[in-house]
Amino acid sequence: MKLYYKRGGEKVLQTLSDERAPILQVKNLRKYFPIYSPLGRVKGHVKAVNNVEFTLNERETLGLVGESGCGKSTTGRTIMRLTEPTEGQAIYKESDLFKLKRKEIEQIRQEIQMVFQDPHSSLDPKQTIGHAIEEPMKIHKIGSKKERMERTLDLLHKVGLREDQYYRYPHEFSGGQRQRIGIARALAVNPKIVICDEPVSALDVSIQSQVINLLQELQDNLNLSYLFIAHDLSVVRHIADNIGVMYLGHMVERAATDELFSHPLHPYTQALLSAVPIPDPKLKKERIILKGDVPSPLNPPSGCIFHTRCPHVMDRCKVLSPALTKKGANHFVACHLYE
């Protein structure tokens, strides 16, 4: 929020603390995976992420949703440089993450951490959870041995685990507890951004709510920004401030959470929201059933990538690819219906 006041007869602009500045800006992100022939020649590319753009603000949560294989997890891993981008920019603190050298990206990872989808495979079975949480601090040379242990015990308490579990191994914990360990490990180095790659998809519904509430509490206490990747729209609605909808590697719609759920514009978003169950047996809504299968990212359709399944397809959709255009205060959609 902006406030004007007079100082010495001069009008001065004061920015209040509730205005949230951008912390991460992703522009024209593309990630293509090469396909090799038996002779080792490149014969094509899987276009996993294609021209994705979004802005993540300080202390906010941006949700990325879409069907399996739409490129949302690849987007998160590419930002982390776990896989190298084909093209694009990821601006963090005026630095392009994609242009940083190896030592520079290792330093920046102290401020950008990731919680992985599978809480079991993301932990070393031969390593106690105490040592797993301390390892990022060792890599970044944070604190002494005693200080690292004290911080680890404090983190265990913050994520709802007991201090006496410090010397236990991952197989001694449930799925929800292992995910809490993963969250504690990500927070060990005091990050500013946490990329959550479907952190609750492998958990029971009751445990999902506990982990979501934990993430929100930690965000409030530690001033974190989340990029929350998921396919469950009801979960994303609960935690996200803004939502980006992806389809076949493209961002087809982006809006504030309440705006997206009350006024979805893209036919794909409308179909996704129609599948979200309503917790009231007396209420009924029309289900939008999409025909056909998702095209292969190895050979995506020309024009609008959704036109092969769209119930409102027009001739121009088969030829021209729609740009992501602004249709509201914070609402963007890529569809010829709104041009």
Image (tube, helix red, strand yellow):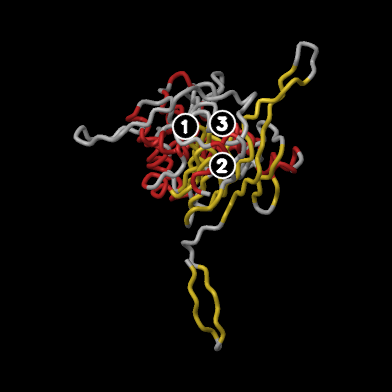
Q: Is 281 left or right of 272, judged from the image as shown?
A: left
Q: Secondary structure at mark 1?
A: loop
Q: Secondary structure at mark 2?
A: helix
Q: Where is residue 257 drawn, in percent x and y?
A: 42, 47
Residue type indicated by callout 2: Glu
Q: Where is residue 263 drawn, in percent x and y?
A: 39, 47
Question: What residue would you read off at disc 2?
Answer: 147
Picture quarter containing residue 52?
top right
Question: What residue would you read off at disc 1?
Answer: 199
Looking at the image, tell me whether mark 2 or mark 1 is earlier in sequence order.
2
- Whether residue 82 is situated above or below residue 142 in the rendered picture: above
In the orientation shown, which residue stands out farthest toward the bottom? 9
Rendered image: mark on residue 248: 3
**Which of the two residues, 137 or 199, is positioned nearer the viewer here?**
199
**Which of the two residues, 54 or 264, is positioned nearer the viewer here?**
264
- Whether residue 295 is situated above or below residue 251 in the rendered picture: above
Between circles 1 and 3, the one closer to the viewer is 3
Q: Residue at x 53, y 49 (%)?
A: 339
